[in-house]
Image (tube, rainbow, N blue to C red):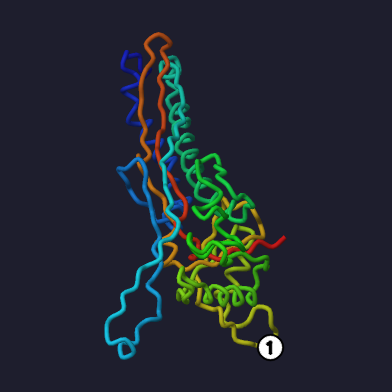
Amino acid sequence: MPMTSDHWAELIDPRMREAFFIGFSGGDRRASMVPTIYDVIATVLGDEKVLPIGGIGSSGWNFEDTGRVQYGEAVKGYEETFTPHEFARGVQVERKLIDDNRIAQALDMAGALGDAAFRMREKAGANVFINAFSAATAETLDDYGTDAVGADLVALCSTAHPRHKLDASTTDTNEGTLALTAANVSTTRQLMAETLDMNGDLLNVMPDEILVPVELEDTAIQIVRSQLDPASANNAVNPQAGRFSVHVWHYLTDSNAWWLMDSGLRRRCLRWYDRIPLEFARETDFDTLIGKWRAYMRFTLGWSDWRFVYGQNPS
């Protein structure tokens, strides 16, 4: 029956809400990569400040030489500030649409808005990697309020990361131009194993993940799951088999770029702060007889330290 009550928007709100969150979740059709790649943290603060601390140096342990305990001071890194940004989008439903018993059309609009919210968050998360090789050396914000450079004023993947704020002349790298092959995964793994901390000591980085766009998914799976070397016809053992998990993100836009990551370090360094989780609210305009539903959220994301990842950006 047509719904003609003056409270029509209120009456259909539960169904609109359900359609919105079904659209956002996608059901069994898809899964968000955001909680897979980022450490998603609920925050009540307007700003989150993270100050990476370098380890205590490995020298100065010989007690017999000094006869007393030597005390070390941890090196401080670059402080990163995470400031949540507001995001909102809405849909409008005319009263006559409901009077004419076309509720399904209104529910489709709510579902489409939920789907758009999902896609926006995925794009925001993927953009950190899309901009990972940026040449920017100053604040450059994307559409989601995320800076293309870190607190050290270079991109996530760079050949010129300052060792730490008091030793900016000494630089380290986590960027290359190698294509995705088993041999190049091995090379990149070895480069990551040589990563130094702020004191210049080995950090003991243990890469165990490969992040790729959908175009490189088959190649990555062949590299990490083939017991024999996929590039050899001589039954050579593939040493990369079982070493890595593969993360495929459909929202990565470069069909050639790929990243090797240490999952333990990634969870400590790659951050997503939800200040206001996704919400869905309604109001009705009395004069225009239009119901309005809007999605709203506040979040911020980025990295506090670059050492969890090594990016390869082939031309």
> Quick one: SS at disc 1?
loop
Up the image or down, 164 lies above or below 105; here it is below
Q: Which amino acid does label 1 sit on?
A: Asn
Q: Name the residue under label 1.
A: 234
**Splitting the image into 4 quarters, where does residue 181 fall?**
bottom right
Q: Residue furthest front?
A: 66
Who's the residue at 34% across and 18% down the image?
A: 8
Who's the residue at 50% across and 45% down the image?
A: 146
Instruction: Classify mark 1: residues with Cα within 10 Å, few (<14), some (14-19) or many (20+).
Output: few
Who's the residue at 41% across and 41% down the image?
A: 84
The percent position of residue 6, horizontal first and vertical second, equals 32, 13
The percent position of residue 301, horizontal first and vertical second, equals 45, 48
Q: Quadrant of the N terminus?
A: top left
Q: Residue furthest top?
A: 287
Who's the residue at 31% across and 79% down the image?
A: 70
Is residue 281 shown left or right of residue 186?
left
Up the image or down, 235 lies above or below 280; here it is below
Q: Quadrant of the C terminus?
A: bottom right
Up the image or down, 141 lies above or below 165; here it is above
The percent position of residue 234, horizontal first and vertical second, equals 68, 88
Q: Which residue lies furthest to the bottom in this view?
A: 64
